[in-house]
Amino acid sequence: MIRKDKLVTDCYYHIYNRGTDKRTIFLDKQDYYRFIHYLYEFNDDVAVTNFSYYESKYSVASEDIGSDIHPTSKGKDRDKLVEIICFVLMGNHYHLLLKQLKDKGISKFMLKVGTGYAMYFNQKYKRTGRLFEGTFKSILADRDSYIVYLSRYIHLNPAERMESAQDEDKKKERGNVADFLSNYKWSSYLDYIGKKNFPSVIDKSFILNYFNNNPESYFKFVADGYGDDTVVPEQLFLDIC
């Protein structure tokens, strides 16, 4: 499918998508690890000639990504398509904040990630057909402040899980949110607050520069944003769940 909007090199974009019919696309830890591994593995201008290789050659079921071990890429230099600023994976959708480094870089990257993961998922769960709801969605982040607040929006996404498990009077307790997010693995948030998780996947420098490279300041920024809709651009609130 050809995109109607042209994504501009050296610009930042909020990229997101969900499972078709809102279906769950991450069913166990292996699925989360696999998608995050693909975020690293396929961030390379080298074309993928055999996706089936990535389905059968290795398994991603441990802390390999967080330990900077990448079975098929170790020892080779990558020609990156995008800079991955931050990400979060939820049960039926994902959010990415990307900077495009090459012409059509985001489209090439997302095609490889989407195709590779769909093939893995369909083979594992013995299903056929489309996994994602069409082509990924994109929103240009055209201001530095927007990019910073977008990172907070993305990292706060898992708080919806906490809300569903809490009583009504506990939903706005920021301390609970901070604790919950600090234990949510499928996100770049832990790396931003100084806990090594998936460090080789992302580039934190753009965001953390606004906080004097102080993870504690970023931690406070995210926690303070919970429940405060007034400081987040209106277009960030997306109906994708």
Image (tube, rainbow, N blue to C red):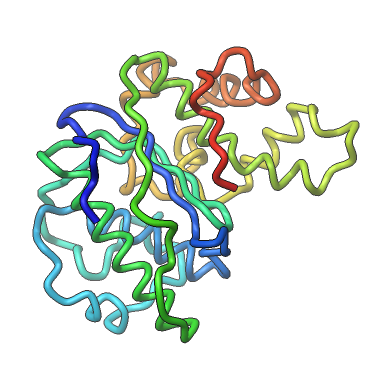
How far across and how far down the image is residue 220, in percent? 60, 21
Residue at 23% across, 27% down: 11
Quadrant housing residue 137: top left
Residue at 67% across, 25% down: 226
How far across and how far down the image is residue 58, in percent? 31, 79
Whether residue 110 sits left or right of residue 121 in the image: it is left
- The one nearer the camera, 165 or 7, is 7
Count of numbered circles on the image:
0
Whether residue 76 sits left or right of residue 185 in the image: it is left
Whether residue 47 sits left or right of residue 18 in the image: it is left
- The one nearer the camera, 234 or 191, is 234
- The one nearer the camera, 151 or 204, is 151
Q: Quadrant of the N terminus?
A: bottom left
Residue at 77% across, 41% down: 163
- The one nearer the camera, 116 or 152, is 116
How far across and how far down the image is residue 198, in percent? 40, 50
| In the image, residue 58 above or below residue 84 | below
How far across and how far down the image is residue 85, in percent? 34, 35
Residue at 49% across, 25% down: 235
| In the image, residue 55 above or below residue 202 | below
Whether residue 135 sits left or right of residue 124 in the image: it is left
Quadrant housing residue 132: bottom left
| In the image, residue 206 above or below residue 50 | above
